């Protein structure tokens, strides 16, 4: 449902839903990845990078996804983004 909210460009709605999902799925990297995506699209790069780091720590495949996800394009040149995605 969070991914659907992102597709609809309802980023605050996605964040609200995904933060609630973390209460039940805190070990799932996908929730952190989607939260990072939503925050990135809202221009909250620092928050997005912290969440992306958590996603990659839980599942290293998110590193490759983030490097190819247009929603993260604004962060691709960021030193912290490069460092985080090279963790994998």
Image (tube, rainbow, N blue to C red):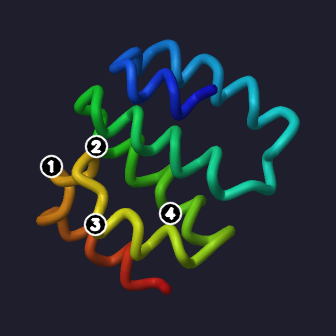
Q: Which residue is mark 1?
A: 74
Picture layout, residue 50 above or below residue 6 = below
Q: CA distance from mark 2 to mark 1?
A: 8 Å
Q: Which residue is mark 2?
A: 45
Does label 3 or label 1 sit earlier along the sequence? 3
* Residue 3, label in figure: none
Q: CA distance from mark 3 to mark 4?
A: 16 Å
Does label 4 or label 1 sit earlier along the sequence? 4
Q: Secondary structure at mark 3?
A: helix
Image marks 4 and 1: residues in contact by CB distance under 8 Å: no
Q: Secondary structure at mark 4?
A: helix
Q: Which residue is mark 4?
A: 53
Image marks 2 and 1: residues in contact by CB distance under 8 Å: yes
* Residue 68, label in figure: 3
Please tell me how crowded label 2 is: few (under 14), some (14-19), or many (20+) other residues with Cα within 10 Å: some
Please tell me how crowded label 4 is: few (under 14), some (14-19), or many (20+) other residues with Cα within 10 Å: many
Q: CA distance from mark 3 to mark 1?
A: 12 Å
Q: Secondary structure at mark 2?
A: helix
Identify the residue at image location x=12%, y=65%.
77
Image marks 3 and 4: residues in contact by CB distance under 8 Å: no
Which label lies toward us, 3 or 1? 3
Q: CA distance from mark 4 to mark 1?
A: 16 Å
Relative image position of residue 69 (x, y in whole percent): 30, 57
Picture layout, residue 27 above or below residue 39 = below
């Amino acid at each position: 449902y969070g991914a659907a909210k992102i597709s609809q460009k309802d980023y605050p709605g996605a964040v609200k839903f995904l933060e609630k999902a973390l209460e039940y799925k805190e070990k799932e990297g996908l929730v952190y990845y989607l939260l990072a995506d939503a925050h990135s699209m809202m221009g909250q790069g620092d928050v997005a990078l912290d969440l992306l780091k958590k996603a990659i720590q839980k599942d290293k495949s998110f590193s490759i996804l983030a490097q190819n996800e247009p929603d993260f394009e604004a962060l691709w040149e960021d030193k912290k983004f490069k460092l985080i995605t090279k963790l994998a």
